[in-house]
Image: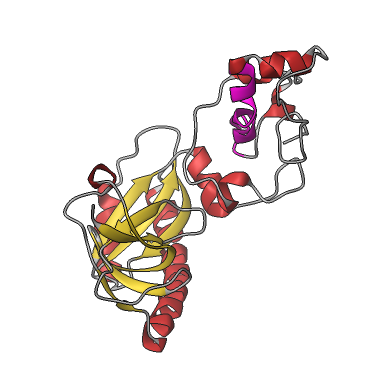
Amino acid sequence: MPAVVGVRFKPAGKIYYFDGRDLELAKGDKVIVETARGVEYGQVVLARREVPPEQVVQPLKRVVRKATAEDEAQVRQNQVREAEAYAVAEAKIREHKLPMNLVDVEYTFDRSKIVFYFTAEGRVDFRELVRDLAGVFRTRIELRQIGVRDEAKMLGGIGTCGRVLCCASFLTDFAPVSIRMAKEQNLSLNPTKISGICGRLMCCLKYESQLYDTGEGTKKKHGEKGGGARKPGPGSAAGGR
């Protein structure tokens, strides 16, 4: 099995595996890695380990080096440029009168590409916008349409439970959530009470659904003794989140 390290590029983002066998890497180290979209800056969140081949996306990219002080300075410079690019893109969107909402702007570490994330009700013809942005920034431009759940994950916020959004703090993927989960947990079906700030059903409705699938949650709901069904905690759907 290949020996890899797990690297994350954003808080609560997905973990990607890289070949780091030529370097002494520990959890928490900042690194520069090769990716499909260019050279990127990330953080080691899983120390070297062996994983089954089917979990590794081929070809396996490598860790170029540990991040240096110069690399950290470039990351800060990129963040300043991202803010400037955001303002320019917003002005261009208004100029072209496009029905889209700019959410975030991201430079790759080596500045070979700028990615503009946006939301929109439907498809948007942004070809003229891309040409304008390419003329301003003189680099590759990518406009990526995202959903409202991804928007909430990027922007963050506080949920109705008073805690930082799950998607922005620890959820790496969005699991399917249905109104059936709220019904099984005997929760209010008022959309304002079971929807997150994204307007979709709260991700935490999924947390206890497995108990109800096995019948344990039903026993708990009717006051029967369940074999290990836990009491709802502050982070559970039945506890308000």
Residue 192: x %, y % from top left: 72, 28
Residue furthest to the right:
223
Please identify the residue farthest to the bottom as the structure is shown: 69
* Front one among 147 and 233: 233
- Image quadrant where residue 208 sits: top right
Hey, which quadrant is residue 142 in on the image? Answer: bottom left
Q: Residue furthest front?
A: 227
Residue drawn where x is 42% and y is 84% of the image? 73
Residue 157, given in percent of the width and then of the height, sits at 65, 51
Q: Is residue 133 above or below residue 170?
A: below
Q: Is residue 132 visible?
A: no
40 displayed left or right of 221: left
Query: How many labels, in total?
Result: 0
Specify whether 203 is left or right of 88: right
* Residue at 56 percent of width and 21 percent of height: 178
- Residues in magenta? 198-213
Going by the image, does 19 lie left or right of 95? Answer: left
Q: Position of residue 52 (x, y in %)?
A: 28, 46
Choose between 200 and 83: the one closer to the eye.
Answer: 200
Q: Position of residue 125 (x, y in %)?
A: 30, 41
Is residue 188 in view from this perspective?
A: yes
Tell me if residue 206 is in the magenta stretch. Answer: yes
Residue under the image location 79 percent in, 17 percent down = 225
The quadrant of the rendering that contains the C terminus is top right
Give 97 or 214, whichever is nearer the viewer: 214
Is 137 colored magenta in this rendering? no
Q: Identify the image's colour scheme: rainbow, by chain, secondary structure or one colour.
A: secondary structure
